[in-house]
Amino acid sequence: SAAEKDGYEYFMLKEIAEQPRAIADTLRGRFDTSGGIILDEVRMSDQDFRDVDKVFIVACGSSYHAGMVAKYAIEHWVRLPCEVELASEFRYRDPVLDRSTLVIVISQSGETMDTLMALRHARNQKARVLAISNTVGATIPRESDAVLYTRAGIEVAVASTKAFLTQLAACYLVGLHLAAVRGIKYADEVAAVVAELAGTPEKISQVLEAMEPVRELARRMGTADRALFIGRHVGFPVAMEGALKLKELAYMHAEGFAAGELKHGPISLIEAGTPVVVVVPSPRGRSLLHDKVVSNIQEVKARGAAVIAIAEEGDDVVAPHVDHVVFTPRVPTLLAPLLTAVPLQVFACELAAAKGLDIDQPRNLAKSVTVE
Ligand code: G6P
């Protein structure tokens, strides 16, 4: 009903707007006095966490993209090897698992059959499973050895927004938990992240307040039949998620690529006017990645692309090279997806609305896929 939508035209708009609150709720009260994270359910000991020598992250759809971001954080902070895998592929390729393997399954619904089957396979092989889920008491958290619940609240729109963002927050918390329990919690960078995380809801609000130009751009792009999304480092999964949103909502052919792969194929897709959305890494610390992405932008521009950049506030290098730039507030690189994903959600939602499509219930898709 209209009342449930709180005055918004679609649930998706409401859920996009709820993201600062959802992140704040997901972070609230999570830290214990020693800097560790309080998980919601733990059926494994700290020693089990210390014994971990390898991490797999397994999920589907947007949850898989959250897992891709988690890999960058966990490997960097915790120094544990970490693989990310699509749940539908995981058990069929005979992954190497034992009791010192930690499998992190991410599922908003907690009922996705592919993810549940991957979980069961992992547990049969004696691996420990930690679930990140938005649904208290769902099958996936019930069958796992430890659980961290996201507190997005009920997500109605099929295309995930606030659940995805809270999955990112939960992934950071799991990374911090692993770092704490394994005794590296006092590393300066990890400690700084805890403080920065607390400030992200406010920064997401700032991003949301500045979305009118993105909406206007999306309305003008309604006639495009495809779009490319590129990014590097944690901007790569954000590009994948931006492309997925556009496929789900606007039925457009959209692909997310690692920007470095452009030259190995995707650049041949660029024609005059092809929209290319670029998630630009922070230029701080004279980042080499930033320079490389600026060259990628020049390469696609030279072939006629219409470039929309998502860049960090204060990045004055990128603006002259692109057609449109959307700035997001400064935050540590690993946390940037909490901000950079938001304009891509708004973009896809508005573009689909401009085409008159069903935002909350796109054709052929289901909120929770309970068949393999
Ligand atoms: C479906 C939904 C997606 C979701 C995916 C995984 O495809 O439409 O939005 O990302 O399932 O769902 P889960 O509940 O396991 O996170």
Image (cartoon, helix red, strand yellow):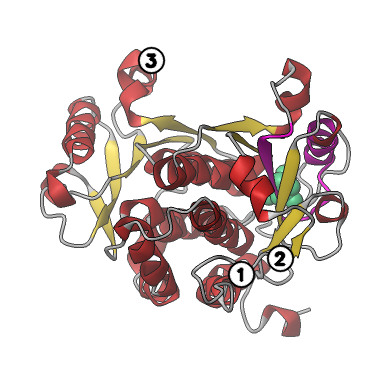
Q: Amino acid at mark 3?
A: Gly
Residue 322, image quadrant: top left
Q: Image check: 306 left or right of 38? A: left
Q: Which mark is residue 265?
A: 3
Task: Name the residue carrying label 2.
Answer: 155
* Res 79 visible: yes
Mark 3 Cα shell of 10 Å, populated few (<14), some (14-19), many (≥20)? few
SS category of the residue bearing label 3 = loop
Image coords of residue 285 (percent x, y): 14, 49
| 154 shown above or below 254 | below
Q: Amino acid at mark 1?
A: Glu
Task: Depth check: give the residue in front, 210 or 168.
Answer: 168
Image coords of residue 229 (percent x, y): 41, 38
Q: Which mark is residue 182?
A: none
**Does the beta carbon at disc 2 come under 8 Å from ligand 1?**
no
Task: Depth check: give the residue in front, 226 or 18.
Answer: 18
Mark 2 Cα shell of 10 Å, populated few (<14), some (14-19), many (≥20)? some
Mark 1 Cα shell of 10 Å, populated few (<14), some (14-19), many (≥20)? many
Image quadrant for the C terminus?
top right
Residue 52 shown in magenta: no
Residue contact between numbered discs 2 and 1, judged by CB atoms under 8 Å: yes
Q: Which residues are magenta?
A: 99-122
- Sequence-wise first label, 1 or 3: 1
Residue 82, image quadrant: top right
Write the residue at 53% across / 56% down.
168
Between marks 1 and 3, how big is the CA–CA gap? Answer: 36 Å
SS category of the residue bearing label 1 = helix
Task: Name the residue carrying label 1.
Answer: 15
Residue contact between numbered discs 3 and 2, judged by CB atoms under 8 Å: no
